[in-house]
Image (cartoon, rainbow, N blue to C red):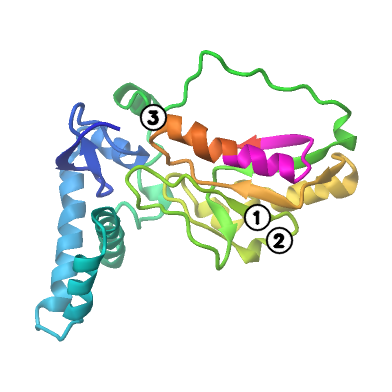
């Protein structure tokens, strides 16, 4: 991914030194319009939120802090920093990461053009793409898998790592018979207001079951597959996450897969 500069983006992630490009869609929505002040405000909110509970010098678990610093590796401590930053901005209650997604400016006109122009390499491009396979039999006789980048996962499972500056390259199995109330969303990079009202608008688990019950598709795999789309290393995404999901889809007996980007 190249060297990181000491400049910070709107979401708290470091910006790449060579280009100064935004690290993600949230940052592009402000930085793409030259709103550097928005990034500084996010840092200030986290700093104030961290300072406030310490003003009266309450007792804190310094032994835990010192032990953590002494025993954890640099990568874990750096990861912890991003978790703390997000936690503190969320506590402030008025950051771009906590505002309702419809008000956060993520979908301003020209956003994706800004990302593609200022952050080349973040989009997967292939000159040797494999053509899509044709159905071997009618869809009404075909077992269907569903793969989504919506960040939907069963409650109680390890949350997707939405704070890692380079992304999360894991996926979650979602039982095809799960109720929407048994699922939750861990994703920051698309507006989720509608999905929280009706999960089917982004992860149509009930609609797919209806299609199977009506005979429009031959059946569904036992699990659906979910990941988060914020992954800034396309080669690693293809080498690990894409291959892992493909293997899981085949192992589940899928004869076709519906791919749905968030």
Q: Quadrant of the N terminus?
A: top left
How dense is the environment of label 1, judged by Cα within 10 Å: few (below 14), some, or many (20 and up)? many
Secondary structure under the numbered disc 1 in the rendered image? strand
Residue 10 shown in magenta: no
Q: What label does residue 1 carry, if any? A: none
Q: Are marks 2 and 1 in contact (CB under 8 Å)?
A: yes
Q: What label does residue 174 carry, if any? A: 1
Mark 3 to mark 2 CA distance (whole Å): 33 Å
Q: Is 185 placed left or right of 98 in the picture?
A: right
How dense is the environment of label 2, judged by Cα within 10 Å: few (below 14), some, or many (20 and up)? some
Give the mark nearer the N terminus: 3 vs 2. 3
Secondary structure under the numbered disc 3 in the rendered image? loop
Q: Is 109 placed left or right of 260 in the picture?
A: left
Give the mark nearer the N terminus: 3 vs 1. 3
Q: Quadrant of the C terminus?
A: top right
Mark 3 to mark 1 CA distance (whole Å): 27 Å
Residue 255 shown in magenta: yes
Q: Is 199 placed left or right of 28 in the picture?
A: right
Residue bearing mark 2: 178
Res. 261 in view? no
Residue bearing mark 3: 122
Q: Nearer the viewer, mark 2 or mark 1?
A: 1
Q: Residue 102 appears at what percent x and percent y?
A: 43, 48
Q: Nearer the viewer, residue 128 or 15?
A: 128
Q: Residue 106 appears at what percent x and percent y?
A: 38, 41
Q: Nearer the viewer, residue 198 or 90?
A: 90
Mark 2 to mark 1 CA distance (whole Å): 7 Å
Q: Are marks 3 and 1 in contact (CB under 8 Å)?
A: no
How dense is the environment of label 3, judged by Cα within 10 Å: few (below 14), some, or many (20 and up)? some
Residue bounds of the magenta highlight:
244-258
């Amino acid at each position: 991914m190249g060297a990181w500069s000491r400049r910070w983006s709107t979401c708290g992630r470091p910006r790449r030194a060579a280009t100064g490009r935004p690290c993600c869609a949230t940052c592009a929505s402000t930085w793409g319009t030259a709103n550097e002040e928005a990034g500084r405000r996010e840092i200030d909110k986290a700093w104030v939120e961290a300072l406030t509970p310490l003003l009266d010098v309450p007792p804190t678990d310094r032994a835990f802090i010192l032990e953590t610093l002494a025993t954890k590796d640099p990568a874990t401590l750096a990861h912890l920093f991003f978790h703390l930053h997000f936690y503190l901005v969320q506590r402030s209650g008025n950051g771009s990461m906590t505002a309702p997604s419809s008000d956060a400016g993520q979908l301003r006109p020209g956003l994706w053009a800004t990302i593609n122009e200022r952050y080349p390499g973040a989009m997967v491009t292939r000159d040797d793409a494999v053509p899509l396979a044709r159905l071997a039999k009618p869809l009404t006789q075909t077992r269907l898998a569903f793969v989504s980048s919506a960040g939907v996962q069963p409650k109680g499972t390890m949350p997707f790592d939405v704070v890692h500056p380079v992304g999360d390259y894991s996926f979650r199995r979602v039982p095809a018979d799960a109720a929407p109330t048994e699922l939750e969303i861990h994703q920051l990079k698309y507006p989720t207001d509608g999905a929280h009202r009706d999960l089917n608008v982004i992860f149509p688990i009930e609609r797919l079951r209806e299609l199977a019950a009506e005979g429009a598709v031959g059946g569904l795999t036992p699990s659906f597959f979910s990941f988060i789309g914020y992954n800034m290393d396309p080669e690693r995404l293809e080498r690990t996450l894409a291959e892992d999901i493909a293997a899981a889809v085949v192992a589940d007996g899928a004869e076709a897969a519906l791919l749905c980007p968030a």
